[in-house]
Image (cartoon, coloured by chain):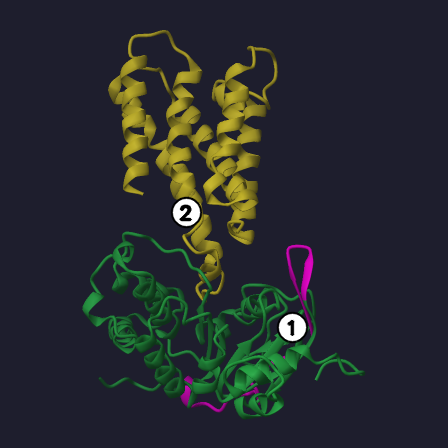
Chain colours: A green, B yellow
C-alpha cells in the first residue's frame, strides 16, 4: 500500500534529540517521583528498566505530555512540554501505550484504532489504510472486526500497540508492552520494535531484562526517580560479575548496577 | 449512551404520564430535566483519560459542545411533557433548568470525573426538593417560576461557570 509523503515529514527536524530533559522533576499527586533527571534520547529503541516504583511510568506519562513536569525542563520533539499550549503539534507525532488503558467495550478493534487515529489528527483519507496497516503489524488482522470486550489480555495489549503506531509516530512510548504476550508474540514484538527503531525514537519500559537485551539499542536504568545508568545492553552485561545474582550476563549487570552505591557528584 | 438515552426518555415519559391530571408542581416539572442531565453526565469523561490527554485534537470546543448538547437534550423534555399534557411547563422554566443543571454536571465532571458528574445536579435538586417554600431563590432556583430574576441568574452563572471550567480543564482523572 502506498502512502503519500507530506512536506512536513520530509522537512528536517528542528531538534537534535526527540527527548531532552534537564533537571526534570515529576510528581504523582503530591509525591515527587522523579527528581533531577537529565536525559537525551534520539532515534533507536531505548529500554527503560528499573524496579517497581522507580518512576518509569511517571516518566513515560511526562514524555507523552499527559503529566506536566513540576520542575526542570523537558523538550519533546523540539517543543517544551512544560506549558499548557503548543503541544498539539508534537502530540500528533507521539504514540503512547499506557500501562493499563480503558476503552469502549463495544468498539471493534478497527473502530478503536480508527478513533485513536482521529484523536491524533491523522488526515481522514488516510485513516482506513493507516488503521489496517497498524492492525496488520501487530498480527490482529483476523480479529479486526471483533469487539474489544471479546479480546484476551495479549490481544488487548496488541490492540493497544496498534493504536500507538497508527499515526506513524516519531516518538513511540510503550509502557510494559510485553505484559500478557506469549513467548512467540514477544519475539514478534521485538522484531517490530527493531523495525520501528530504525527511524523512530522508541521508549519501552519493561521488567523483562531479556527483552532489553534482544530488542534495544540503548538502555536506561532508573532507581528511586533517578537515572542510574544510560548505555548499551552490552555495557550493562559487562557491569555484572559472577558474584551478582542473575541467570544471564545482562541480569547480573542489572543487579550490579542497582546495588552500586551512588557515586559522588550526582547522577550519571 | 443508548442505555442513558433509553433511561432518560423512559423516565420523562413516566413522569409525564404519572403527573398527568395532578396539581401543578414545579418539583415534578423539573425532575425530567434533572433525569436527562444525570443520564448525559456519565459521558462527560472518556474511557481512558491518559489517551484522551495525549490526543492532538482541540478538546475545549468539543467539550463545550458536549455540555451544550446535554443541556439542549434536557430542554427537549419540554415538548414531550407538553404533549403528554401533565404539568403546565413553560419554555423559560425548561430552558433555565436545563442550562443550570447541565452547568452543574459539567462542574461535577471537571471536579470529580464523569463517573461522579451526576452528584452536583442531583445534590442541589435534592436540597431544593426538601427546602420548604421560603424566600431562598438561589437555593431553590430550579423550582421557581421562570420570571424569577435571582433564580435565572443563578442558573446562568452555573451554566457559564460549568461550561467554561469544564471546557478549559477537562474531566478530572
Residue placed under numbered mark 2 in the picture: B66
Which labelled disc corresponds to residue A223? 1
Which labelled disc corresponds to residue A178? none
Q: Quadrant of the C terminus of chain A?
A: bottom right
**Pair 1/2: label in front:** 1
Where residue A221 sits, quadrant-wise, is bottom right
Counting from the top left corner in percent of width and height, residue B117 is at: 48, 39
B27 left or right of B18?
Answer: right
Across the whole image, how many numbered discs are drawn on residues?
2
Q: Is residue B14 magenta?
A: no
Residue A18 seen anywhere in this rendered image of the structure: no
- Residue, far right: A264
A133 w.r.t. A29: above or below: below
Counting from the top left corner in percent of width and height, residue A83 is at: 62, 67
B156 w.r.t. A137: above or below: above
Chain to which the residue tagged by mark 1 belongs: A
Counting from the top left corner in percent of width and height, residue A47 is at: 51, 80
Residue B72 seen anywhere in this rendered image of the structure: yes
| Chain part drawn in magenta | A8-33
Where residue B38 sits, quadrant-wise, is top left
Counting from the top left corner in percent of width and height, residue A193 is at: 40, 82
Separation of residues labelled 1 and 2 (CA atoms): 43 Å
Where residue A224 sits, quadrant-wise, is bottom right
Q: Residues within 10 Å of mark 1 (few under 14, many from 20)?
A: some
A189 w.r.t. B59: above or below: below
Q: Residues within 10 Å of mark 2 (few under 14, many from 20)?
A: many
Q: Is residue A31 magenta?
A: yes
Chain to which the residue tagged by mark 2 belongs: B
Amino acid at each position: 500500500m502506498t502512502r503519500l509523503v507530506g512536506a512536513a515529514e520530509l522537512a528536517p527536524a528542528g531538534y537534535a534529540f526527540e527527548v531532552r530533559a534537564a533537571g526534570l522533576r515529576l510528581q504523582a499527586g503530591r509525591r515527587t517521583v522523579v527528581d533531577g533527571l537529565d536525559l537525551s534520547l534520539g532515534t533507536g529503541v531505548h529500554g527503560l528498566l528499573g524496579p517497581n516504583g522507580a518512576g518509569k511510568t511517571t516518566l513515560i506519562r511526562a514524555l507523552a505530555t499527559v503529566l506536566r513536569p513540576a520542575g526542570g525542563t523537558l523538550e519533546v520533539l523540539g517543543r517544551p512540554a512544560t506549558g499548557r499550549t503548543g503541544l498539539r503539534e508534537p502530540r500528533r507525532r507521539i504514540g503512547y501505550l499506557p500501562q493499563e488503558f480503558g476503552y469502549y467495550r463495544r468498539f471493534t478493534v478497527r473502530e478503536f484504532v480508527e478513533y485513536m487515529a482521529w484523536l491524533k489528527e491523522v488526515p481522514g483519507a488516510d485513516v482506513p489504510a493507516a488503521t489496517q496497516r497498524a492492525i496488520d503489524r501487530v498480527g490482529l488482522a483476523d480479529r479486526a472486526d471483533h469487539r474489544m470486550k471479546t479480546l484476551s489480555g495479549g490481544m488487548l495489549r496488541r490492540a493497544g500497540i496498534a493504536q500507538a503506531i497508527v499515526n506513524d509516530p516519531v516518538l513511540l512510548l510503550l509502557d510494559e508492552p510485553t505484559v500478557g504476550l506469549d513467548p512467540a508474540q514477544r519475539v514478534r514484538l521485538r522484531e517490530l520494535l527493531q523495525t520501528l527503531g530504525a527511524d523512530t525514537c522508541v521508549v519501552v519500559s519493561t521488567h523483562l531484562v531479556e527483552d532489553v537485551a534482544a530488542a534495544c539499542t540503548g538502555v536506561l536504568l532508573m532507581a528511586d526517580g533517578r537515572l542510574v545508568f544510560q548505555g548499551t545492553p552490552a555495557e550493562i552485561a559487562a557491569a555484572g560479575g559472577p558474584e551478582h545474582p542473575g541467570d544471564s550476563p545482562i541480569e547480573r549487570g542489572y543487579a550490579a548496577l542497582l546495588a552500586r552505591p551512588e557515586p559522588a557528584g550526582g547522577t550519571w | 449512551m443508548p442505555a442513558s438515552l433509553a433511561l432518560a426518555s423512559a423516565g420523562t415519559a413516566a413522569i409525564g404520564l404519572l403527573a398527568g391530571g395532578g396539581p401543578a408542581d414545579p418539583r415534578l416539572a423539573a425532575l425530567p430535566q434533572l433525569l436527562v442531565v444525570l443520564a448525559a453526565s456519565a459521558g462527560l469523561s472518556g474511557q481512558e483519560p491518559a489517551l484522551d490527554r495525549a490526543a492532538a485534537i482541540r478538546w475545549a470546543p468539543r467539550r463545550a459542545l458536549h455540555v451544550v448538547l446535554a443541556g439542549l437534550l434536557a430542554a427537549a423534555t419540554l415538548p414531550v411533557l407538553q404533549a403528554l399534557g401533565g404539568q403546565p411547563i413553560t419554555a423559560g422554566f425548561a430552558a433555565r433548568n436545563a442550562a443550570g443543571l447541565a452547568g452543574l454536571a459539567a462542574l461535577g465532571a471537571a471536579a470529580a470525573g464523569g463517573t461522579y458528574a451526576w452528584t452536583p445536579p442531583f445534590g442541589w435538586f435534592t436540597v431544593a426538593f426538601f427546602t420548604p417554600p421560603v424566600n431562598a431563590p438561589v437555593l431553590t432556583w430550579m423550582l421557581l417560576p421562570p420570571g424569577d430574576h435571582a433564580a435565572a441568574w443563578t442558573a446562568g452563572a452555573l451554566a457559564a461557570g460549568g461550561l467554561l471550567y469544564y471546557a478549559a480543564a477537562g474531566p478530572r482523572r
